[in-house]
Image: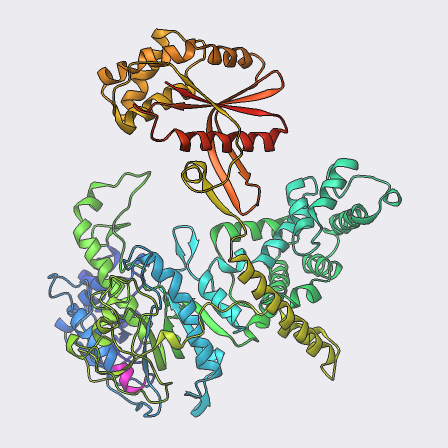
Amino acid sequence: EYGYEYVYGHESSFSDSLFRRDDDARATLLAGDGNAAAPRPGKLFFVGDPKQSIYRFRRADVAVYERVKRELCAQGAEVLHLQTSFRAVQPLQELVNACFAPAMDGGRAAGDDSQAAYVALQPSRAGRADQPAIVALPVPDPYADWGKITNWSIEKSFPEAVGAFVDWLVRDSGWKVEENGAEVAVQARHVCILFRRFKSFRDDVTRDYVRALETRQIPHVLVGGRSFHDREEVLAIRNALNAIEWPEDELRVFATLRGPFFALADDDLLSFRGRVGRLHPLRRFDREQLAGGEAQVAEALAVLAELHFARNRRPIADTVARLLAAVRAHAGIAIWPTGEQALANCLRTLDMARRFERGGARSFRAFVERLEDDAERGAAEEAPAVEEGTEGVRVMTVHRAKGLEFPVVVLADPTCKLAREVPSRHVDPRRGLWAEPLCGCAPLDLLDAVDDELRRDRDEGVRIAYVAATRARDLLVVPAIGDTGAEADGWLAVLDPGIHPADENRRAAVAAPGCPVFGVDSVRQRPSESPGALASVMPGLHHPAHGAHDVVWWDPNLLDLDRAADVGLRQQSILEADAQNVAVASGARAHAAWQEAHRAAIAAGAVPSSLPLPVVELATGDVATDDRSIELIDLGAARAAGGAIFGSLMHAVLAVVPLSAGAAEIEALLRLHAVLLGVDVEVAANAVPRIAAALAHPLLQRAAASTERADVRREVPVTWRDGGGAVIAEGVVDLAFRDGGAWTVVDFKTDADLTARRADYERQVRLYCAGIEAATGEVARGVLLWV
């Protein structure tokens, strides 16, 4: 390792003789104040790298280290800096030096020891001239629909870019890395994707990255995190084991039978539930009386029953293995799009059962509860040997990667914040104080130290980014956004000066060694109002604004993004005993034909067979209607022009007012809706006599009589096809009531003058009548009620 500081004397013996044996020193040690003890010359030696101190939540504080070092130096200790890096190639060291030297100032800006003092790295390995050591991988689609760069868009777009770049790297690049002193082609096992966190609130940050790798059939190993427990095959195993332990839990039993292992149809499960009874593996029923799908349900329940009765008389792993064998999971899962990984996870569950038993546990129920607890907490054991055998891309957090190194490191989740917005604790070792919020309340000690704690959290965030960047040996891939002023403000922002060129050089890219021929834009899609490609960093080789290294900005337009899964064709060749590949080739041709038909169906579906249009719009057009007569009833009210808002008020009240209401009730409803619609109450009062006149008309009196028979519809949506079927008409009928085996359709009109639009209104009511006749099979007549 590099970058460490050695504080030493002449011997490295750790014993009681490290400290002077005088009464004062012994008293200070017994009192617990080790900082006051005086070390004996030549007896103390310790090593550490404060730049990699990232466990502050475990009380590993840089300030304590710096204070002890300062006190030891005051008593004659010497400090030796080891600066030569035997891990990374020279361009990576130059990037790290350029970015972190300004950020790690030894706490001088804050006036304390909260940050490490930077010690520059010295090179040991030269970089390759035929391939880059640093790649800035732009987010392909950072813009949201409304034309702004958002964290949501970045989080949605960047995982696909990582998956596509790793796919190109391991399959097409031809790049080399050093392994055991020899140069070898980049393979999946050489790549590590590093995260600051695995969870954002309750969401698994790694899931989209893992899916991008799975879609491209890239083997991978997830070290920790929730994704293992959220995978379909693991959920299916957990449901099945719960159903075996608790057969009376019908929901778990149903989930097991309906899930991917038994895959029984809803119709069969519903039929069995209706004719036979509960889905209970231990219930008695005559299987000979069942046939078809119901017999399959009974057979599946019998499997769960047998496993339940013997679960505590055989090893836990044996029960899991018998379950997988009974449902032929190995063959079924192998043809999944991610079959190899799914099979590895099933076998991983077996391995977890064996390790659980080796730990002394014998209860099947204890193992099932352990799986549920791990899933709830998002815990996952280290990957077992079977999954390690895939030699895939490692997906892990920076904290798990500390002390490790990888030929290729891809930094992920660029929107993760550098530090918390609110500190989670305040620790003062000298006072023996630990203060943290409890039940939503924070102690005064924490509130008084908010600014200091936030600064220390940010300082540690910088150190976490340092640890992440220094895990790489040959290639470091850093997230980036190509457009001007759009750099993501996250945990990797400290690296921006080392990858972004100066503004005047953003378009001054040259051809990058070992890379494809790039285009001119580092953003794949952007809104029309954005500055355009001329404002982005041009893909190619750049010299950044800070540092002596070069950076290759990738072209996202060359990545194979948005790839769909291959639906298991690769796994089919594993299962087929077909030496001449005849069946595999036939299956491939059939799959190609299906894909063509699938594309044709999508293309055909993109053309609407029917066009939905509102009745109001149809009535003003050239749509053909029947020639039925529409009656106009003019109540003869004194109408003043009140505008559209007054008409809305009238319609709102007519839609809810009881058809037998009096003036007081009408007035109360008008005042209420006037407030809701923002109409002056005095203006609304003008509508009282008009609505009262409408309710007093014989037509609405007939509707009121139909109300008692529940044959009245008010503000009822109506949707139907016109005669040719090319248009779907949609509208809302003000009032329709059934009287004497026929429907009367009433449309309220509140216009000051009906003459100009009467023809359109009559066509509108004819369309309503046609729709109601089509829906009910009964005759409908139309009325325009001019209120």
For residue 90, above or below residue 584: below
The residue at 51%/45% (across/down) is 727
Q: Position of residue 229 (x, y in %)?
A: 53, 56
Q: Quadrant of residue 579?
A: bottom right
Residue 169 visible in this rendered orientation of the protein = yes
The residue at 69%/64% (across/down) is 332
Magenta stretch encompasses residue 492 = no
Q: Is residue 525 left or right of residue 452?
A: right
Foreground pick, 290 / 508? 508
Q: Residue furthest right?
A: 288
Residue 403 visible in this rendered orientation of the protein = no
Q: Is residue 784 left or right of residue 247?
A: left
The residue at 28%/18% (across/down) is 639
Foreground pick, 768 / 492? 768
Q: Position of residue 490 (x, y in %)?
A: 27, 62
Q: Is residue 229 left or right of residue 112?
A: right
Q: Quadrant of residue 152?
A: bottom left
Quarter that holds the N terminus: bottom left
For residue 554, above or below residue 703: below
| Chief SS of the magenta region | helix
Quarter that holds the C terminus: top left
Which residues lie in the magenta part?
89-93
For residue 616, above or below residue 44: above
Q: Is residue 698 left or right of residue 411?
A: right
For residue 249, above or below residue 202: above
Magenta stretch encompasses residue 92 = yes
Foreground pick, 91 / 778? 778
Q: Position of residue 556 (x, y in %)?
A: 36, 74
Q: Position of residue 486 (x, y in %)?
A: 24, 64
